Amino acid sequence: MNIPDDLIALERAAEEQRARLAGLNGEEYDAQRRAWREASAAAQAAITDHATAAGLSRYDVEMAVKRAVRHAEQDPAG
């Protein structure tokens, strides 16, 4: 499945926001959690839009995007 770069970038941004939650608490945690949820919602909306426009399963597109992001994170050249 050909995954557009913008979907990968949005998912990567959401994952980066999630990772920033580590070690936070209180108001800092709450603010970062909101940032993560906003980034995640943007990624999910883009995935849904792409899947709908391409006539694909939203689930399949989401899994392909997540695999692409994870693969890039594990690839030292990525």
Image (spheres, rainbow, N blue to C red):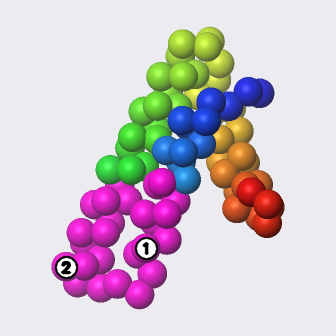
Q: Residues within 10 Å of mark 1 (few under 14, many from 20)?
A: some
Question: In which quadrant will I find the N terminus?
Answer: top right
* Furthest residue in direction front, as rendered: 77
- Looking at the magenta stretch, what is its main secondary structure? helix
* Residue beneath disc 2: 27
Magenta residue check for 19 = yes
| Residue 6 appears in view | yes
The residue that appears at 32% across and 66% down in the rendered structure is 33
Residue 6 % position (x, y): 54, 35
Observer able to see residue 63: no
* Magenta residues, start to end: 13-37
Disc 1 from disc 2: Cα separation:
14 Å
Circles 1 and 2, Cβ within 8 Å, touching? The answer is no
Residue at 66% from the left image edge and 51% from the top image edge: 69
Task: Give the residue at x 31% y 59%.
Answer: 35
Q: Amino acid at mark 2?
A: Glu
